[in-house]
Amino acid sequence: MKKLFTISTGLLVIVFLTSCTKTLVLDQHDNQQTCDTGAVRLIADFEASRMDECQVLADNNYLITITPENTPINPSPWYAFKIEADTATDITVNIKISGNRDNRYLPKFSQDMKTWSVYPHKYRNKQLILNIKASTKPVYIAGQEVIDNQYYVDWAKKLQKTAHITHQQLGTSQQGRPIYKIESRGESNEWLVILGRLHPPEITGALALFPFVETLLADNPLAEYFRKNYNLLVIPNLNPDGVAMGNWRHNANGVDLNRDWITFKQPETQQVHQYLQQLVASGAKIKFAVDFHSTQHDVFYTMPTDYGVEDRYFVKHWLGALDKAMPNFDVIQKPGNRPNNGVSKQYFADNYQVHAITYEMGDETNRDNIDIIATNASILLMQTLLANVDHNKE
Ligand SMILES: [Zn+2]
């Protein structure tokens, strides 16, 4: 007999909201369902978790359905949940993406939420199938490593111990979560701007941002000289609501923040824009910006050299140096101009007449390589920005 244990904690709230409001804003807890047979529990009760529906199909066989926060949406299904049992039990977990969509991420496994590895799995009819040993010690399954909002706060505090930086609140998200900025100010009015986590599941972008920034803030002559000559503004986690809710892509209003850099209808992008405008009004010069993301493969989306921004060959010089320095890594530069699209790199080019890039790491790029690429890219960016070279000449 087929047992159906769909215990919904948030379903009633969703139905109520849908019937009385036009915009459905999901609370952090609305996507938290539980499968609880009394002996085995599948739970999504932590920040950044997601398990929209859980059914017990048969003894020790579970079906999880993952649904996006709203549609239309770029298909990057995110899931993260915890499994525990009263006694050691072998279970099968099937993960289905609603709308029969493809799964994007290889499932990752952790026992401590710190160390993660790709978990053995099969696909059947687009469903991911995992055989897992559940026990009293919880295990975690997620689309990528779970990096929650607190992780960024802890990281910034660690940086503060060794680098002369400030870590302050820049603004507030739609749901009232703090948006933090890290700043280093030297003897210059030129700024390098770094953005991250506009898209919550794009973890490999975050895994690149950390070493990239750490290298800029390192305790060595190059980084120190760089920080004397350039100020640094880092906003590592611009979508804390999306991160907390385990969203596929959007903020709490169901909007893609990397399409909002032209209308600024969302509080998150609006506050960054206002802050940059304020800096410029007080004499600052935005020099360059890097926005960290993830996609299927490693690629650097750049502005074309003939777009009319200053130092037209600067990015080509920088990424060309990275390509030369890493013979085993193919640096793919994709110049593009997307007017009216609301992408951050276009915003920097159009508003400050400077280059900016979208730094994309592949979803499954080797994690050690992400670190090595970012460290090299950071060192070479400092060298390129400091070099006494005419970047208007190829
Ligand atoms: Zn992205």
Image: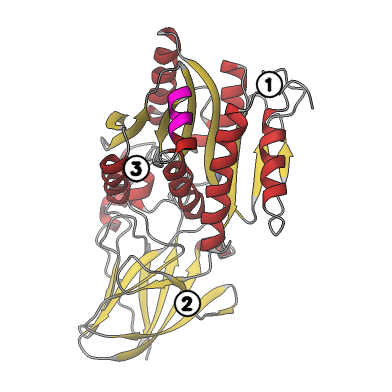
Question: Residues at badges 2 and 1 in contact (C-beta under 8 Å)?
Answer: no
Judged from the image, the quadrant occupied by ligand 1 is: top right
Cα distance in 3D space between marks 1 and 3: 34 Å
Q: Is residue 12 above or below residue 321?
A: below
Magenta stretch, residue numbers = 224-229
Q: Amino acid at mark 3?
A: Pro
Residue ID for mark 1: 311
**3 and 2 marks in contact (CB < 8 Å):** no
Left or right: residue 255 versus residue 138 is right
**Residue 174 at least partly seen:** no
| Identity of the residue drawn at 59% across and 64% down | 102
Image quadrant in which you'd find residue 336: top right
Q: Is residue 39 magenta?
A: no
Tell me the mark number nearer the camera, choosing from 1 and 3: 1
Query: Which residue does the image show at 31% across and 32% down from the upper left?
Result: 165
Magenta region's main secondary structure? Answer: helix
Q: Local crowd at mark 1 within 10 Å, few (<14), some, or many (≥20)?
A: some
Residue bearing mark 2:
119
Q: How far across and down, in percent of the image, does residue 223 sit? A: 46, 36
- Secondary structure found at label 1: loop
Which residue in the structure is indicated by mark 3?
A: 240
- Residue 270 on image: x %, y %: 41, 23
Q: Earlier in the sequence, mark 2 or mark 1?
A: 2
Q: Residue 135: which numbered mark, if any?
A: none
| Helix, strand or loop under label 3 | helix
In this rendering, does residue 56 appear at all?
yes
Comes first in the chain, label 3 or label 2:
2
